[in-house]
């Protein structure tokens, strides 16, 4: 079952031990390699109460590892004594939730609030403030999105005091939980040693997305007896700096741990694509295509320009794919972009030209969003949103947890509870009308049924359509015979053909400036985001930019004669 492994992969799966970093280029088969290592360890595992912890940063990532273990190596669902999940879920389960009271000073088990755990609105402290503030590694408070905060917010005792007061009462966001978990391990080394004994093997996938606090947690476990640690990732694919990711931490570990190794064999892309994308990578050599099916594919990546004609650019790209023998589908063909506003132009949806403050309150947005998703086939997602926000609103809860939902089910009975949620969903009007008309119709229905609350939007948003406000979610509603979405939404995926659409700049950084000044990808998240997009295809890569100046800058960087 390991016969397809390369020599370097075999070294990782069978021979290496101790602490080491696997630096993996795009398409190197790192997930396959992690799955193979994990399968070998599990097949030979004899300890009943100690296990392997395999962590990543998204549910999609760890589920892909589990899928590889099942499909390629015959390993069933990974359960006790092992742990497979996100690094946040590991921190929550084994450190923060059982021991958080030791640091917070609360008399109850802590409660996680804010995304992704649900909405939060304290009685005297707005969700925008509580969710937007957390703790840096040195203990100082910082704003996760500085633009949402007044410049002098740190001097405002109401803001900082409320944050500390709610923390002391046992409430914490996920960022808070990571910080307090670190403090727990620092103050109580016995807890760190117990975790190191419980999980003597630690594998961290996508380790380039580690924050300094998360890396400190790993270091504390190492300091307290954890000997077997594998960090797998690619610093060039770190695109979550907004979530405190620091790719340089992985690079530092690669340099510090002498046992580290590079996977530079590309199992995804043609050699033409490997050579083309090498232009902005930090690799010392271009990755080598080892996929015999696509290695010699003749199509050369190219940079083109667009000018108010993106629908035609997309149409021409689809035609080119078909001419090259690609059966266009959501699995094979992707249109991806850096800026979400691009999708409006592709789909012919008018841009919102005023400020984004459409919603008077958060519950109105959640009711509208949940119903829109439900109306467009995403029944499970829409139901979950509406279930939570309805219970939160009717029960006047500051936060609706899974426990609150379970309590309601226990009181009413499962069938009755779910039936009432479905009845409420059917009560709301369909979302094929303007926001203003929908709110009016919804409020009429809510009043007639004595629901006791109403929905409100600002007047500037009354004429907007639901697609204008919600199509830029991670998963799109409008059906196409190709996949389309942001670069972030397709990270880790493979397509036969990709059209990457870029503007003149990303978030604050002009591509032309970055390229002409030879800014390293190691210090530019904008270049890393573009790089992730460029490395998704196996056969065809086309980059579309808005003018010739940008085209020349990209070609000078990427095209090699």
Image (cartoon, rainbow, N blue to C red):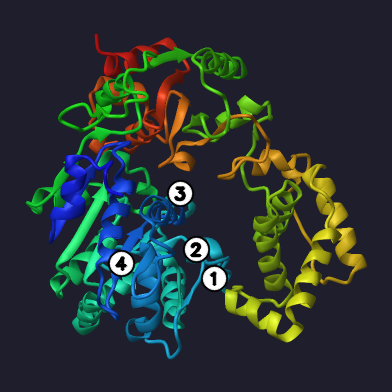
- Mark 4 lies on residue: 53
Q: Quadrant of the C terminus?
A: top left
Distance of mark 2 from mark 3, alpha carbons? Answer: 12 Å
How far apart marks 4 and 3 lie (CA) works out to: 37 Å
Of tags 1 and 4, which is closer to the observer?
4
C-alpha gap between disc 3 and disc 1? 18 Å
Where is residue 349 drawn, in percent x and y?
Answer: 68, 30
Label 1 sits on a secondary structure element that is: loop
Which residue carries the number 2 mark?
129
Q: Residues within 10 Å of mark 4 (few under 14, many from 20)?
A: many
Callout 2: SS: helix
Within-10-Å neighbours for mark 3: few <14, some 14–19, many 20+: few
**Residue at x-position 72% and y-position 68%:** 390
Q: CA distance from mark 1 to mark 4?
A: 37 Å
- Check disc 1 and report the residue beneath it: 125
- Which of disc 3 and disc 4 is earlier in sequence? 4
**Residue at which label 3 appears:** 147
The x and y percentages for residue 24 are 25, 42
Q: What residue do we see at 28% from left, 41% from top?
A: 4
> Looking at this rendering, what residue extends furthest in the bottom direction?
107
Q: Is residue 542 above or below residue 458?
A: above
Q: Earlier in the sequence, mark 1 or mark 4?
A: 4
Judge the density around disc 2: few (<14), some (14-19), many (≥20) Cα neighbours within 10 Å.
many
Residue at 13% across / 71% down in the picture?
Answer: 223
Element class at badge 4:
strand
Residue at point 21% right, 26% down?
286
């Amino acid at each position: 079952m390991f016969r397809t492994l390369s020599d370097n992969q075999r070294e990782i799966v069978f021979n290496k031990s101790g602490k080491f970093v696997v630096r993996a280029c795009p398409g190197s088969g790192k997930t396959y390699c992690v799955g193979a290592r994990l399968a070998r360890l599990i097949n030979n595992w004899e300890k009943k109460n100690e296990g392997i912890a395999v962590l990543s940063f998204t549910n999609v990532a760890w589920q892909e590892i589990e899928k590889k273990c099942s499909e390629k190596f015959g390993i069933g669902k990974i359960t006790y004594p092992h742990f497979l999940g996100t690094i946040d879920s590991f921190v929550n389960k084994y450190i923060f939730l059982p021991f958080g009271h030791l640091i917070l000073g609360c008399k109850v088990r802590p409660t996680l609030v804010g995304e992704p755990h649900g909405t939060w609105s304290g009685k005297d402290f707005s969700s925008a403030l509580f969710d937007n503030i957390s703790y840096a590694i040195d203990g100082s408070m910082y704003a996760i999105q500085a633009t949402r905060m007044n410049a002098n917010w740190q001097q405002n005792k109401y803001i900082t005091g409320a944050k500390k007061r709610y923390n002391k009462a046992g409430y914490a966001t996920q960022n808070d939980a990571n910080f307090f978990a670190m403090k727990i391990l620092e103050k109580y080394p016995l807890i760190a040693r117990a975790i190191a004994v419980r999980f003597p093997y630690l594998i961290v996938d996508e380790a380039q997305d580690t924050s300094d606090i998360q890396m400190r947690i790993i270091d504390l476990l190492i300091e307290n007896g954890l000997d077997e640690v594998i960090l797998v990732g690619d610093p060039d694919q770190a695109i979550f700096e907004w979530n405190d990711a620091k790719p340089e931490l992985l690079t530092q570990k690669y340099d510090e741990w002498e046992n580290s190794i590079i996977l530079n064999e590309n199992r995804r892309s043609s050699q033409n694509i490997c050579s083309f994308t090498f232009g902005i990578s930090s690799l010392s050599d271009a990755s080598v295509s080892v996929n015999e099916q696509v290695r010699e594919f003749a199509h050369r990546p190219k940079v083109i320009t667009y000018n108010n004609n993106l629908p035609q650019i997309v149409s021409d790209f689809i035609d080119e794919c078909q001419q090259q023998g690609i059966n266009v589908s959501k699995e094979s063909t992707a249109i991806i972009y850096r800026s979400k506003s691009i999708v409006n132009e592709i789909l012919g949806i008018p841009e919102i030209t005023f400020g984004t403050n459409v919603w008077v309150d958060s519950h109105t947005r959640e009711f509208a969003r949940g119903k829109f998703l439900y109306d467009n086939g995403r029944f499970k997602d829409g139901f979950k949103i509406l279930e939570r926000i309805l219970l939160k609103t009717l029960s006047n809860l500051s936060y609706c947890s899974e426990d609150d939902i379970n309590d309601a089910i226990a009181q009413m009975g499962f069938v009755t509870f779910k039936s009432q949620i479905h009845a409420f969903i059917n009560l709301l009007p369909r979302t094929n009308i303007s926001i203003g008309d929908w709110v009016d119709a919804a409020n009429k229905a809510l009043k007639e049924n004595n629901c006791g609350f109403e929905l409100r939007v600002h007047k500037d948003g009354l004429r907007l359509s639901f697609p204008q406000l919600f199509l830029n979610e991670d998963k799109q509603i409008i059906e196409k015979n190709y996949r389309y979405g942001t670069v972030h939404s397709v990270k880790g995926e493979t397509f036969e053909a990709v059209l990457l659409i870029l503007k003149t700049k990303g978030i604050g950084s002009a591509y032309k400036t970055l390229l002409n000044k030879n800014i390293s990808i190691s210090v530019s998240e904008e270049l890393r985001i573009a790089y992730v997009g460029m490395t998704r295809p196996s056969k065809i890569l086309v980059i579309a930019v808005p003018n010739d100046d940008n085209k020349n800058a990209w070609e000078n960087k990427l095209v090699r004669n």
